[in-house]
Amino acid sequence: MIKVKTDRYGLECVENKFLKLPNVQKYEVVKRTEDGFVASVEMDNGYEFLLNACVVNQVFPSTVMQLIEKQSMEQGMRILVSPYVSERTAAICEQNEMGYFDYAGNCWFVGHSIYLSEKGNKNPRPKEYKAAAIFERSSVVSSLILRELFVDVTRVWKLKYLAEKVDCSIGQVSKVMNFLQENAWAEKTKDGYMLREPEALLYEWSRIYGKKEASAYALYSLDNVSILEKKLKFLKKDMGIESYLTGFSGGVRYAPVIRYNKVHMYLAPEDIQEAIAYLEMKEVSSGSNVVIFPLENDSYIKDSRKIEESLVVSPVQIYLDCMQLKGRGEEMAEAVLMKEIIK
């Protein structure tokens, strides 16, 4: 756990919240501790209780889990104080009834007839807490490691095995696994690493993955979806061009839960113009019924499968892509998640 010398910000962000409450008569810090401070709160009816604050410079969900495990009412009510508290960390705190306060004024505390909740304040030092790079589209090696983990979400993984499967260094695998462990998405056991809360992990991956819009060709075809998908087979036979279905057209191959009228696919960048000409499509600024994503790296088609004579990207890629689609994209992603990934 990374600790920080308790500065005035850490003290004041808690003090200011409690002193504004009409039912709090008195608030004072009674002592400093190794990892924070202890404060006494006196209610207007004379009732007093202690807050045992743990102050950390940079907090991870794993930090919170450690605090929760050693939480004791004899030490007073444990609260977390940090310059920045992420949404995931905040959710874990609330689920386990642990209060938290950050320097931007965001907070949550429930106890002794007190309810405090404030969210949405912009952190004054956001540059220090950038989104995890391993989830970005450009992080190819990290992406391959994550995809391997989702091949079997119940498996215990060795670093050496993962490095060999992905063809990367053990150091790169270790970096990814340490990050997942810090954020309580993975845990280290005596036999290796295993995922915990894979659904939450995949959701966060899709959220950051979608922040940068994928390059794509929006196209219009006179053919309906069924005819167009049949033509893709001839595209391979006549022109030697492979296409990989994704989005709704790929998702229904795994979980037929929706109807769709737009085809999404991956093609090698050098094949796109030739495919557009062969399929007699044209680029449009609106009203497209075909979207082609350039296959910029092979991570997009890792673990792709042949279903009903069509090549389809993996369930993980379907999830990532469908979560970015408007309409029923999230419903499609959830169906594939439950049927193919979380078994």
Image (cartoon, rainbow, N blue to C red):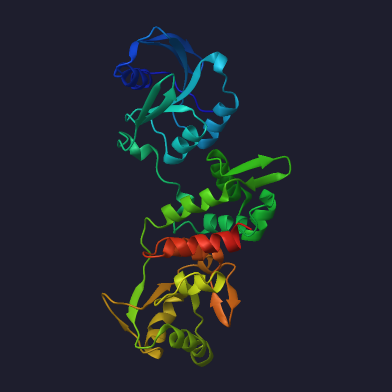
What quarter of the picture does the N terminus occupy? top right
Q: Residue 14 at what x, y percent from top left?
A: 37, 20
Is 8 placed above or below 265 here? above
Which residue is painted at 47% across and 36% down in the image? Answer: 89
Q: Residue 67 at what x, y percent from top left?
A: 55, 27
The reply to whether residue 82 is visible in this rendering is no
**Given the current orientation, which residue lies at the most extreme left position?**
285
Which residue is painted at 60% across and 68% down in the image? Answer: 303
Is 1 placed above or below 258 here? above
Is 167 placed above or below 21 here? below
**Given the current orientation, which residue lies at the most extreme bottom position?**
238
Tell how many labels.
0
State the residue in front, 69 or 335: 335
**Given the current orientation, which residue lies at the most extreme right position?**
191
Is 6 placed above or below 182 here? above
The reply to whether residue 205 is visible in this rendering is yes
- Hey, which quadrant is residue 152 in on the image? bottom right
Which residue is painted at 51% across and 81% down in the image? Answer: 242
Determine whether, in the image, residue 312 is placed left or right of residue 294: right
Determine whether, in the image, residue 117 is placed left or right of residue 336: left
Q: Residue 4 at what x, y percent from top left?
A: 45, 23
Q: Residue 91 at what x, y percent from top left?
A: 46, 38
What quarter of the picture does the C terminus occupy? bottom right
Which residue is painted at 51% across and 28% down in the image? Answer: 2
